Amino acid sequence: MPHRGVHQRLRLLHGGTHTTSSSDETGHVTGTKDKDYNVIWFTEVCLSNVLRLETYVQDADREGDSELADFFRKAQAQSKKGAESGKQMLKSRLGS
């Protein structure tokens, strides 16, 4: 799939049609430039993963599978790290 901006990819995922190229959307339609939205999206996905992985850790712990629980804890730590990086990037780009 050729590169498309996040807005266009989301529209396609939700059954819409692709009417503009990624270079066409520069914030005029959405009010948010794709590059800023991409960081917002990345940060939200990382935070969502942290929450989802907590469920997976609890499931593995409940089943007595410490190896799997540790695996998910490590993944969760990486997602937290990504979320923190995203928040710092947003703060520096969008202001405090």
Image (cartoon, rainbow, N blue to C red):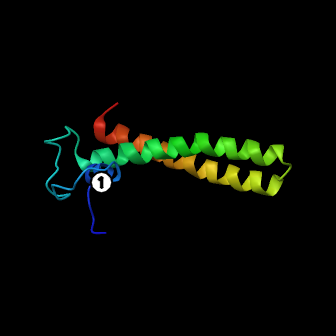
Task: Tell me which residue sits at (19%, 37%) in the image.
Answer: 31
Q: Quadrant of the N terminus?
A: bottom left
- Residue 89's quadrant in the figure? top left
Residue ID at (83%, 48%):
63
Q: Amino acid at mark 1?
A: Leu
Question: Residue 41, percent across and down?
Answer: 39, 45
Place residue 33 in its image quadrant: top left
Residue that protrudes farthest toward the bottom in the picture: 1
Quick one: 49 or 15, which is closer to the camera? Answer: 15
Quadrant where the C terminus is found in the figure = top left
Q: Is residue 68 left or right of residue 54?
A: right
What residue sits right under mark 1 in the picture? 12
Q: Position of residue 82 (x, y in %)?
A: 50, 49
Residue extending farthest front: 15
Circle 1 packing at 10 Å, graded few (<14), some (14-19), many (20+), is: few
Would you place residue 91 above or below residue 16 in this image? Answer: above
Residue, far top: 96
Residue 10 pos. (x, y %): 32, 50
Instruction: Where is residue 56? Give x, y as percent.
Output: 69, 46
Q: Secondary structure at mark 1?
A: helix
